[in-house]
Amino acid sequence: MKKWMFLLVSLFTMQMAMADNDKPIAFEQLPATAQTFIKQHFSDAKVAFVKMEKEFLDSSYDVVFINGDKVEFDKKGNWKEVSCRRMTVPQAVVPVKIQEFVKSNYPEAKVLKIEKDRYEYEVKLSNFWELTFDLNFNLIDMDNDND
């Protein structure tokens, strides 16, 4: 029992020591996939800084632009989140089925943020609606942030 307790305490201590381990890196240190994504979709934007976030068993990358826009990537360089403050999320980033849904239901709204994970897409619109889609692009939740 003491061995298990020691192991758990050791693992917890290691996790705490490695948590919040943000490290600034050069753009060229991003995975090639992430570099290509930025060059393709944000070619005119100036990069303010790039950082790598190391966690216990995972890492991610954040690219923040001078205008406040931000892109987050997983350890392989695949985008996880695109958040735009001064412009809309590039249309090529938003899946076509989501674009069609937004255009037909909220024709005046723009996509300001999109997040994806293993289970769903979350989209924030300029009209304060937040839409959640499953991986088959079926709407599964919606919330108005203007309440």
Image (tube, grey):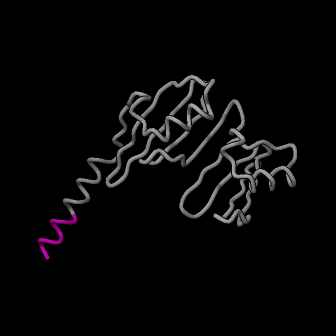
Where residue 31 sits, quadrant-wise, is top left
Which of 97 and 80 lies nearest the eye of the viewer?
97
Q: Is residue 126 magenta?
A: no
Q: Position of residue 79 (x, y in %)?
A: 54, 46
Q: Position of residue 14 (x, y in %)?
A: 23, 53
Write down the region rendered in magenta.
Answer: 1-8
Q: Residue at x 81, y 53 (%)?
A: 100
32 left or right of 65?
A: left
Dominant secondary structure of the residues highlighted in magenta in the image: helix
Placement of 37 over or under 106, stated as above or below: above
Q: Which quadrant of the rendered structure holds the N terminus?
A: bottom left
Q: Residue at x 65, y 55 (%)?
A: 122
Residue farthest to the bottom?
1
39 left or right of 140?
A: left
Q: Position of residue 59 (x, y in %)?
A: 38, 47
63 left or right of 4?
A: right
Placement of 116 over or under 69, stated as above or below: below
Which of 15 and 116 lies nearest the eye of the viewer?
116
Which of 132 and 138 lies nearest the eye of the viewer?
138
Where residue 116 sits, quadrant-wise, is bottom right
123 left or right of 126?
A: left
Q: Residue at x 53, y 25 (%)?
A: 47
Placement of 131 over or under 91, stated as above or below: below
